[in-house]
Image (tube, helix red, strand yellow):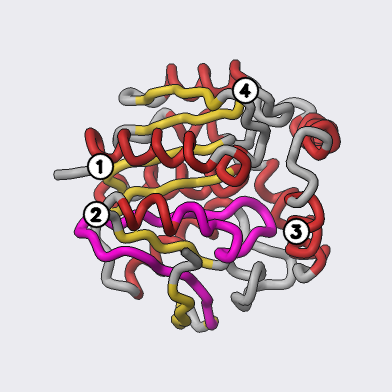
Amino acid sequence: MAGRERWLEVAGRRVRYREAGGGVVVVVVVPGLGLSCDFYRAAYAALATAGLRVLVPDLPGFGKSAGPRLGLTVEQTARWLLAFAGALGLGRAAWIGHSLGAQPAMQLAADHPARARALVLAAPTGAPARRRLLRQASGLVLDIGREPLALVPAVAREYLRTTPWAYLGTWLKAARHDPADTARRIRCPTLLVRGRGDPIVRPDFLELLRQRIPDAHVRAVPGGAHSLVFRRPEEFYALVVEFLRVHGRD
């Protein structure tokens, strides 16, 4: 299932997103750096089948959405996500942030608790603060060897259709954001998920987030690397559906 492609104007710019399902509970997936809504096909199938309404936007400057040349900060992206939800008339939503997309999802939940019924952070980036860029870059190199061969060129094509300035600018700006500090202000139920083979996101970072978020739950997906949402979609989305069944409803 690919989800229905739709277009919307948010903050004066054209935005593409995909949508599937029609349940009362809305789930918004925030893509990882440089990835478009086309990459999250497993989310449409798994979440819509579970009776949830799922939306995945192309973030500003990525995919087919217009955006600033040098990308947005984490805080700006969080405000943009809020505007995106507002333009669609969404109230409280469950937010799934993947990789770097976890940082603006966390920021939104912390800044606007009334708009987040639940939060899922899949392979969340952002730590440790010292040598963060070096560790992420070296982890990315290691991760390439752990991903399915078919995934690597597909991701490369996504990155190539994004300007290098938007990609690099967004990455550098995200490195200045401290998600561990943001975590202290999150009040909604939160699921933290990591692939056990992820060389970018370390177990101690998830444990740090678990300690700082009052209602946090940690799960690990065996055999999953950084792209666990693509490599182990059945296991990952089964965790998400079960979590939202318990924590994502009024």
- Amino acid type at mark 1: Gly
Task: Indicate which label's residue lies in the foreground, 1 or 3.
Answer: 3
Which of disc 1 and disc 2 is earlier in sequence?
Answer: 2
Residue position marked by numbered label 1 in the rendering: 248
- Amino acid type at mark 3: Ala
Could you tell me if the residues under marks 2 and 1 are in contact, i.e. CB atoms within 8 Å?
yes
Helix, strand or loop under label 1? loop
Which of disc 1 and disc 4 is earlier in sequence?
Answer: 4
Q: In the visual, does 152 lie left or right of 68? A: right
Which of disc 3 and disc 2 is earlier in sequence?
Answer: 2
Q: CA distance from mark 1 to mark 3?
A: 32 Å
In-front residue for pair 179/84: 84
Q: Is residue 55 above or below residue 137?
A: below
Across and down, in percent, residue 218 comes to 44, 22
Across and down, in percent, residue 243 comes to 32, 34
Which of disc 2 and disc 4 is earlier in sequence?
Answer: 2
Residue at image coords 81%, 56%: 153
Instruction: Based on the picture, tell me whether residue 17 belongs to the magenta stretch.
Output: yes
- Amino acid type at mark 4: Arg
Specify the farthest residue to the left: 250
Q: How many C-alpha atoms fall within 10 Å of the one at disc 1: few (<14), some, or many (≥20)?
A: many
Residue position marked by numbered label 3 in the rendering: 154
Across and down, in percent, residue 199 comes to 73, 27
Indicate the quadrant containing the C terminus: top left, top right, bottom left or bottom right: top left
- Amino acid type at mark 2: Val
Magenta part of the chain: 14-43
